[in-house]
Image (cartoon, rainbow, N blue to C red):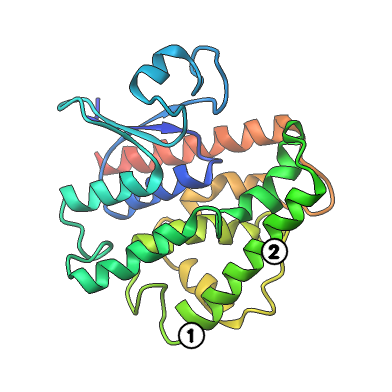
């Protein structure tokens, strides 16, 4: 058994970010499927899960050798980069790292609105978001895209410069999912720099493997997918990740 455990499901955007980082760095891990929001056994609200991870969120990380546990995708990615000196993806230079951190702080309740306003209403009818809430969320998202296109990506290949970092990984799992090749719920035509960046990100190692769930889900722009489709997408994505992990041994 691997000492690194990631708790979550491949369909989750933050979970995909952590899994992608580990695959890029060819680092073995165990993925334990956790049903988000469920209080049943195997759910993120089950008492046993909450003992380790009080916020009841995914992804969460556990090192079974040391007993160290931590939640939140950005915290997990920063921790892994710090522990294993993955300075190529999380620079040790203070100024370069600050640029990455700046995006990671921006991400929540800004770019993360991609899922909240455009994807979740299609796949989670139980959420019952009000129209006012969705409109406010979309307005925040547009401001974020404008800032990224005219600022972050105006003069650089990636978000924090000319090299890929965990900022790009985190951003892409949110923004990339909206493309026509996946859910097809947003048109980036007004943002040429984001469009170029999206193409660059498709070239990153393990892009297709980490996005199997989205390939399986397909276009949701006109019709919400049935729950069975979402479950099957998660299953196929899990199998794809297991195959990649088997090749690392």
Q: Nearer the viewer, residue 210 or 175?
A: 175
Q: Which residue is mark 1?
A: 154
Residue 106: image location, x then y, percent: 46, 61
Q: Is residue 129 above or below residue 199?
A: above
Q: Which mark is residue 63?
A: none
Residue 113: image location, x then y, percent: 61, 54
> Quick check: can you spot residue 180?
no
Query: In the structure shown, which secondary structural element does the residue marked by tag 2 occupy?
Result: helix
Q: Nearer the viewer, residue 28 or 77?
A: 77
Disc 2/disc 1 C-alpha distance (Å): 21 Å
Residue 15: image location, x then y, percent: 45, 42
Q: Nearer the viewer, mark 2 or mark 1?
A: 2
Residue count near mark 2 (Cα–Cα under 10 Å), binned few <14, some 14–19, many ≥20: some
Residue at image coords 47%, 68%: 201
Q: Which mark is residue 139?
A: 2
* 2 and 1 marks in contact (CB < 8 Å): no
Residue 157: image location, x then y, percent: 41, 80
**Total count of labels:** 2
Whether residue 1 sits left or right of residue 114 in the image: it is: left
Whether residue 37 sits left or right of residue 30 in the image: it is: right
């Amino acid at each position: 058994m691997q000492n690194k455990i990631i708790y979550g499901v491949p369909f989750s955007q933050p979970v995909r970010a952590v899994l992608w980082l580990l695959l890029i760095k060819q680092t073995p891990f165990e993925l334990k499927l956790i049903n988000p929001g469920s209080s049943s056994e195997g759910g993120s609200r089950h008492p046993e899960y909450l003992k380790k991870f009080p916020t009841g969120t995914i992804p969460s990380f556990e090192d079974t050798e040391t007993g160290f546990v931590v939640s939140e995708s950005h915290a997990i990615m920063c921790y892994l980069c710090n522990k294993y000196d993955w300075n190529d993806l999380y620079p040790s230079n203070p100024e370069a790292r600050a640029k990455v951190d700046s995006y990671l702080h921006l991400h929540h309740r800004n770019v993360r609105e991609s899922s909240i306003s455009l994807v979740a209403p299609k796949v989670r009818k139980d959420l019952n978001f009000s129209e006012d809430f969705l409109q406010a969320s979309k307005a925040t998202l547009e401001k974020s895209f404008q800032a990224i296109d005219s600022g972050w990506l105006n003069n650089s290949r990636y978000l924090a410069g000319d090299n890929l970092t965990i900022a790009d990984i985190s951003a892409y799992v949110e923004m990339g999912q909206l493309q026509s090749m996946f859910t097809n719920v947003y048109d980036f035509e007004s943002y040429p720099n984001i469009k170029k960046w999206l193409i660059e990100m498709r070239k990153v190692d393990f892009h297709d493997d980490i996005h199997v769930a989205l390939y399986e889900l397909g276009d949701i722009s006109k019709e919400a997918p049935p729950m069975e489709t979402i479950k099957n997408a998660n299953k196929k994505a899990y199998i794809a990740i297991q195959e990649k992990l088997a090749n690392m041994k």
